[in-house]
Image: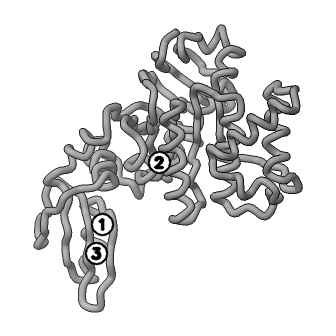
Amino acid sequence: MDNYIEIQNLYKVYSQGRSKFTALEDINLKIDTGMFGLLGPNGAGKTTMMRILATLLKPTSGSISIYGYDLFKNRKNIRRLLGYLPQEFGVYPQLYAQEFLDYIARLNGLKNRKARKAEVDRIMALTKLEDLKNRKVKTFSGGMVRRLGIAQALVGSPRLLIVDEPTTGLDPEERIRFRNLLSEISSQVAIILSTHIVNDISSTCNNLAIIHLGKIAYWDNPAKLLNNARGKTWILKIAHDELAHLKENVGVISMVMQPDHVEVRVVADEVNGFAAENVEPNLEDAYIYFMEIQTGTKLHEYEELYNTQAN
């Protein structure tokens, strides 16, 4: 059996009255084992692609092979290989964590009580939920609920785990814990991680794709993307009244407001008219440089751009 996922010429077109909206256009990817990141702004098509891979949404055209199974012909076989954590994950708040996972195990066909308990115990240990097993889900923090989401997706030992925007709404500590959990699990199961948060990718994924307006704009390893931004990342100290002009001309990563100036981190091929210090880029710098310079779209324009397409 093949040990990879292959997507060829994938399209997803939605009809809206007499008009049509292309959510995915000619997607071609090959995803091997390990952690694979799908990065892009909200509205770029990430969730549509994840739902198609999870067999919850039918594509308009194209082909997908998951470990040798054709997505169109072998949906039942593929579903046995999949674990899925959607962006919006629903739980039963009155159940204890252990009860919830036992219920999920029943839905997955584990009828033997002893086998179910062994599976639930295994999953709770893997996701570090043992201390929470006798707490009701309604008492969980956002990070705990996301861990429970991963746990339910791992019931039945799937070969592929699909995770859509898993850290949205989590505080920084919970986000780090969740990323570390995914990294540990990736040694046992292939993971496709869809996110708009660059740090989720930089610390976990060996390979990534950037999706832009429903198309694959980049597909390679993070190191190559990072290398593209070397010599393009700058620190500036500017007057407060110069900030608006600067933001119109370069991609601003961050700003630190001081009483007499603003310290700004930007990405650009060159910075004219300002004293600028060239610095080593991180992956967030590289991503914004790629999106603004190589796709020609300013990040602050994305919401308007995607809303225009959707309407």
Measure how far apart labels 1 and 2 are at the Cα level.
19 Å
- Give the spatial CA distance, label 2 vs label 3: 24 Å
Mark 2 sits on what residue? 41
Element at label 1: helix
Q: Residues within 10 Å of mark 3 (few under 14, many from 20)?
A: some
Dot 1 crowding, Cα within 10 Å, few <14, some 14–19, many 20+: some
Q: Position of residue 56 (x, y in %)?
A: 69, 27
Where residue 257 sits, quadrant-wise, is bottom left
Which residue is more in the foreground, 242 or 26?
Answer: 26
Determine which residue is flagged by label 3: 243
Is 250 drawn above or below residue 146 in the view shown?
below
Q: Amino acid at mark 3?
A: Leu
Q: Residue furthest bottom?
A: 259
Mark 1 vs mark 2: in front:
2
What type is the residue that disc 1 sits on?
Lys
* Residue 308 is at least partly visible in this image: no
